[in-house]
Image: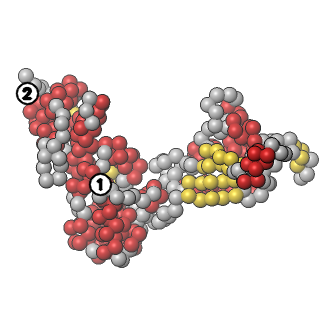
Amino acid sequence: MYTHLTMRVIKRSGKYEDVSFDKILKRIISLSTETETLDKIDIDSSLVAQKVIKELRDGVTTKELDVLSSEIAIFMYSKHPDYAKLASRIVVSNHHKNTIDRFSEKIENMFQTENPMVNRGFYELVMKNNAIIDAKIDYSKDYKFDYFGLKTLEKSYLYKVKGEIIERPQDMIMRVCLSIHRNNIEKAFESYDYMSDLFFTHATPTLFNAGSHREQFASCFLLSMKDDSIDGIYKTLNDCAIISQHSGGIGLHIHNIRAKDSYIAGTAGKSNGIVPMLRVFNDTARYVDQGGGKRNGSFAIYLEPWHADIMSFLDLKKNHGNDAERARDLFYALWVPDLFMQKVIDDEM
């Protein structure tokens, strides 16, 4: 019934070909049967192929066809968990078809672009050891990742050249291991084996920045408000922006900022308190996101419980109320000392 359709698909070579139900079915079956690297999964291949055919349009590319197939498979996840495995396998297979096979060639392309994405030292390390590095990478291990993990990697972690993803998950892992261990190739390969088998992973800044021109691997930065002054507040804000720009998360205490209506000697006026100030930090976290659009900025704000603005502080995350009194993109925590808890227990001031 579905063997020959009038619709056409555009192959990766640019050639047109009639859509074939049998070819779609064959591809799904090939990804669901047991091989040296894949185990057999329990799905209805014909049902998936039929749903794909129903959603097709004329002139769809094979890349788009795979994306559609994976989305249909993950939608069927509620029927059986093996459909999620099929979705991830389609994503990996499609990604492999769209990317180069050799790691060293990808590093060459990333270095030779108008704005090189990797630093010269890393590039020269790879070129010097290209044969053994290329031989070490096992791209079949990409199939160990689940669908949502792969989609997260595609969105933010895998390097792109001219808007097109050039890395595979194994390339990212190898980039990280070589960047950390430098000329100790043996140690880099040892780390690669553990990471590629999913025994552990490094934190986001390491995955983002390894091999780049700013190899900043630290995840968390703890800061204190420099001073209760315009100069101190904005110098602290500047530090937060720079850290967030290069993928760092921030913990900041603001105990020393005076509360609302406190006297300001320099202007003989009254302070606006911590809420308007935190709205500025909130907007900075939104604007200066981590890694340039890769991940939202993450600022955690700490306050001692006896600060006079404590009740307003506790309201800042609420999803209702006056927007001028909210800063919902920050994270909040009380900095509670033992002395405070002892006074609570003893019911004392």
| N-terminal label among 1 and 2 | 2
| Front residue of this view, candidates 247 and 118 | 247
Q: In the figure, 335 relative to 17: above or below?
A: below
- Element on which disc 1 rests: loop
Q: Residue at x 21, y 55 (%)?
A: 140
Q: Amino acid at mark 1?
A: Arg
Task: For label 1, count other residues whose C-alpha is less than 10 Å away and answer few (under 14), some (14-19) or many (20+).
Answer: many
Q: Quadrant of the C terminus?
A: top right
Which quarter of the figure has residue 181?
bottom left
Q: Which mark is residue 168?
A: 1
Q: Amino acid at mark 2?
A: His
Q: Residue at x 72, y 53 (%)?
A: 337
Residue 22, percent from left and from top: 9, 33
Residue 263, percent from left and from top: 89, 46
Q: Is residue 246 visible?
A: no
Which quarter of the figure has residue 198?
bottom left
Residue 61, percent from left and from top: 22, 38
- Element on which disc 2 rests: loop
Residue 93, percent from left and from top: 21, 47
Q: Is residue 317 visible?
A: yes
